[in-house]
Amino acid sequence: MTSATIKLFLPHGDAKRLRVGEVSNWTDKALAAPRTELDDLLLREEAESAGIYFLFGSDPESGDALTYIGEAEVIRDRLKQQPNGVKQANGVRSSFIASAQ
């Protein structure tokens, strides 16, 4: 197995807020943020890329964990199409893996 280095960038200096991850032998980036920072996440240049995204939250009736997985040609545009499911849901965290341009 080839070794790799993982770099984690914390734009606000807090691991519970917006996070950007890179793997040394990988061209893509992984980003994650809580629902309250979705606007900051979508302002990142990586959100203009194609990629896959994950929305993590919980079922409002049962409390069971839910994950929605999708793909988009432009991640920012796709996540903006889901304002009720992303911005207003309790406990939703957004993450995506953006393709390098």
Image: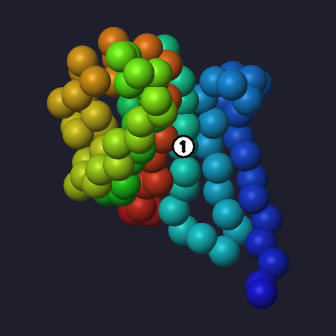
Q: Residue at x 74, y 24 (%)?
A: 14
Q: Position of residue 39 (x, y in %)?
A: 40, 21
* Left or right of residue 23, residue 92 in this image: left
99 vs 54, nearest the viewer: 54
x and y percentages locating residue 92 in the rendered image: 45, 24
Element at label 1:
strand
Is 94 on the left-hand or right-hand side of 23?
left
The amino acid beneath tag 1 is Leu
Which residue has dot 1 on it?
Answer: 31
Specify the farthest residue to the left: 81
Image height check: is 4 above or below 50? Answer: below
Residue 25 in sight from this viewpoint: yes
Q: Quadrant of residue 59?
A: top left
- Disc count in the image? 1
Residue 46 is at least partly visible in this image: no
Q: Residue at x 25, y 21 (%)?
A: 83
